[in-house]
Image (cartoon, rainbow, N blue to C red):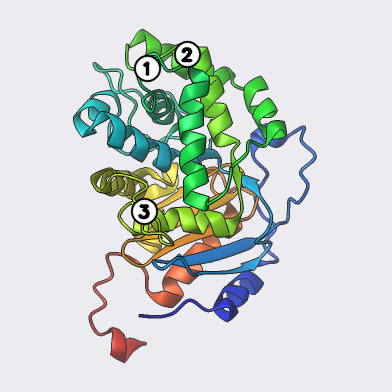
Amino acid sequence: MTTPTVDLLHEILDEIRDDRSGELGAHLADYDHPKPDALAIAVCDLDGNVVSAGDDDRRFDLQSASKPFVYALALGRQGVAEVRKRIGVEPSGEAYNEISLEAGTGRPANAMINAGALVAHSLVGDEGDDETARFERIRELFGALVGREVEVDEDIAGIESRLAHRNLAIAHLLAEEKVLIGEPHDVVEGYGRQCALAVDVRELAMMATVFANGGRHPSTGERMLDQQAVRYATSVMFTCGMYDDAGDWVYEVGLPAKSGVSGCLMAVVPGRYGIAAYSPRLDEHGNSVRASRAIAALSAAWRLHVLDSKVGLAESH
Ligand code: GLN
C-alpha cells in the first residue's frame, strides 16, 4: 500500500496553485472573504495519521460536506426504512438547490442536495426535539469526530439565514408533502447553522476517514456512526456527492466525495483513507475548482479509483 507523503501533497498543490479560475460562492457576494486564494489538502489513514500541505490551519464552514454525516446520523437513528420513505437515493442530475422532488411521493431525490439534506436534518432529532436540540446533536457528532468543540462561523450563519429564501421555499414544499418533520423555518435555520460549522482541512480528512473506516473513529476506534448507515451514505456520496458533475467525477476520479460551497471537498477511499481539500473558488456546479483538481491528481497518482481493478498494477507503476 502506498504511503501518503507530504512531498507528493506539496507537488500536487504546486501544480494547481496558479489556477485562479472559478468564483466564490454566490452567497458570499457581500462578504469580505479573509482568504479567497487559500489552498490546502490533507490525507488521514485508518490509524488516524494525518499528512497535509498548504493552508492546513485555516478553518472553513463545512456547508454541504456536512450532509453525508447528518444523513448517516439520521439513518442510524431512524433506521433505513424510515429514512428511505422520506429521502430517495437517485442522482437528481440537477443543481444542489433545485426542487428535485419525486412525483407522487414528494421525496427529495437524495440527501446530498439541499432538499434531501433539509429532511435528513429534520430526522436527527427525537420527537419533541426543537431546532436547538437537533442542531446540538449534530454539533456533538462533529465535535466527537474532530476531538474538540466545533463552533459555528456566525458571519456565515448570518449570511445563510438572510439568504435562505430558496431553502425556505423547498422546506415549505416538503412540509406540504408531509415529508419534512418539524416546522420549515426551524429546520432551515438549524440546517443553516449545520452548514456554518467550521473545521480545518486536517479535521475534514479525519472526518472522511470515519466513513473509510466503517463508522469508527480512526484514532480511538470508537464507533461514531452505524456501519450500515455509513455504507448507505457513502453510496449516495458516490452517485450524488458532486451534484450535476457526479457522473464525470466518478468516471475520472472514482471516489465517493462531497463538496461544500465554501470550497471544501472530502473524498473517501473505503478501507484506506479519508481525503480533504480546500480552495474557495467554485466551478459552475458549485464544486471547488482546485480542491477537485487536487483530489483528482491524488487519485491518479495513487490509483485510488475504487473501480480500478489494480490488475497489472506492479508492471504499470
Ligand atoms: N448552505 C448551502 C445551501 O444550503 C449549502 C450548499 C452547498 O454547500 N452546496 O445553499
194 on left or right of 171: right
Q: Is residue 174 above or below residue 236?
A: above
Q: Which amino acid does label 2 sit on?
A: Pro
Q: What residue type is labelled 1?
A: Leu
Residue 184: assigned label: 2
Q: Which of marks 2 and 3 is nearer the N terminus?
A: 2
- Residue 242 at x, y percent in the picture: 44, 47
* Separation of marks 3 and 1 at Cα, in angstroms: 31 Å
Q: In this view, does 174 lie above or below 100?
A: above
Q: Are marks 2 and 1 in contact (CB under 8 Å)?
A: yes
- Residue 35 at x, y percent in the picture: 76, 51
Of all residues shown, which one is farthest toward the left?
A: 81
Determine which residue is flagged by label 1. Answer: 180
Q: Which amino acid does label 3 sit on?
A: Glu
Q: Is there any visible trace of residue 65 in the rendered image?
A: no
Q: Which of marks 3 and 1 is nearer the N terminus?
A: 1
Residue 222: assigned label: 3
Q: In this view, does 233 lie above or below 30?
A: below
* Separation of marks 2 and 1 at Cα, in angstroms: 8 Å
Crowd class of label 1 (few under 14; some 14 to 19; many from 20; radius 10 Å): many
Q: Do the residues labelled 3 and 1 touch (CB within 8 Å)?
A: no
